[in-house]
Image: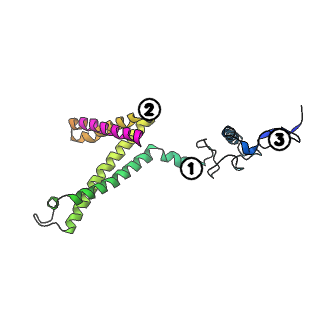
């Protein structure tokens, strides 16, 4: 057996040029090197990403290896941001802001006669208009926040249970959400709300999956 020495990336014989040129590496070679870098860690002479052979985003992670190389703190933050709790909080806050905007808009375009005044029949003052906008905005904000909270929580749990992300999650979540929100007005309103919300959610999911 001929003696040899180890050079970065390949094993070659003495006084011979490397069999593979570093500048001529292919995508397959880069993928192999990235796996080697991940498996061997820091206990090797070849530094892979740091040597510039593998493209990196500057954080030292291995491309295509998911969460490999991420710090524990970063993993915890990522796990929290992907949790149902965080998604529900974001949906609730988004619904609240949307409700405020919708309340201000509807109050601004309504006729002046619909605004409640301190003196019946009097012309609404700026204070009366502001009171009406604030009351309507808070009402819309609470309703939209509740819808976003319930829908996001139900959809996330359904998706986790089914282990799938498809159009059915939105349909099921819309059915449950509509039924729960309509239950306050009676069983019939609950059924109508469940069916209507399910159809609406399905249409929205179909649009997002096919045209987004």
Q: Find numbered disc 3 in the image and state the secondary structure of the residue it sits on.
A: strand
User: How many marks do you count on the picture?
Assistant: 3
Give the quarter of the image for residue 197: top left
Q: Is residue 200 left or right of residue 16?
A: left
Q: Residue furthest left?
A: 121
Q: Residues within 10 Å of mark 3 (few under 14, many from 20)?
A: few
Q: Find numbered disc 1 in the image and state the secondary structure of the residue it sits on.
A: helix
Q: Nearer the viewer, mark 1 or mark 3?
A: 3
Residue at image mark 2: 162
Comes first in the chain, label 1 or label 3 = 3
Q: Is residue 131 left or right of residue 17?
A: left
Residue at image mark 1: 74
Q: Residues within 10 Å of mark 1 (few under 14, many from 20)?
A: few
Q: Are marks 1 and 3 in contact (CB under 8 Å)?
A: no
Is 207 one of the magenta-colored residues? Answer: yes
Comes first in the chain, label 2 or label 1 = 1
Give the distance between the C-alpha atoms of the residues marked 2 and 1, in whole angstroms.
Answer: 27 Å
The residues colored magenta run 191-212
Give the distance between the C-alpha atoms of the residues marked 1 and 3, in whole angstroms.
Answer: 36 Å
Q: Position of residue 168 (x, y in %)?
A: 38, 33
Residue 75 in sight in this render: yes
Q: Nearer the viewer, mark 2 or mark 3?
A: 3
Residue at image mark 3: 6
């Amino acid at each position: 057996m001929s003696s040899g020495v180890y050079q970065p990336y390949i094993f070659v014989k003495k006084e011979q040029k490397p069999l593979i040129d570093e500048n001529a590496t292919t995508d397959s070679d880069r993928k192999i090197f990235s796996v080697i870098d991940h498996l061997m860690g820091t206990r090797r002479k070849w530094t892979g990403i740091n040597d510039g052979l593998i493209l990196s985003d500057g954080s030292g992670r291995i491309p295509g290896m998911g969460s490999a190389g991420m710090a524990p703190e970063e993993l915890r933050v990522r796990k929290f941001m992907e949790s149902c709790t965080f998604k529900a909080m974001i949906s609730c806050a988004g619904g609240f802001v949307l409700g405020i905007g919708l309340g201000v808009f509807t109050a601004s375009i309504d006729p002046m006669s619909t605004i409640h005044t301190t003196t019946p029949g009097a012309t609404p003052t700026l204070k009366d208009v502001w009171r009406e906008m604030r009351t309507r905005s808070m009402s819309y904000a609470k309703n939209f926040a509740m819808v976003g909270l319930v829908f996001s929580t139900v959809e996330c749990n359904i998706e986790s249970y089914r282990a799938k992300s498809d159009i059915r999650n939105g349909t099921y979540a819309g059915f449950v959400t509509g039924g729960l929100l309509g239950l306050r007005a009676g069983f019939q309103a609950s059924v109508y709300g469940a069916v209507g919300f399910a159809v609406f959610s399905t249409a929205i999911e179909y649009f997002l999956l096919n045209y987004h």
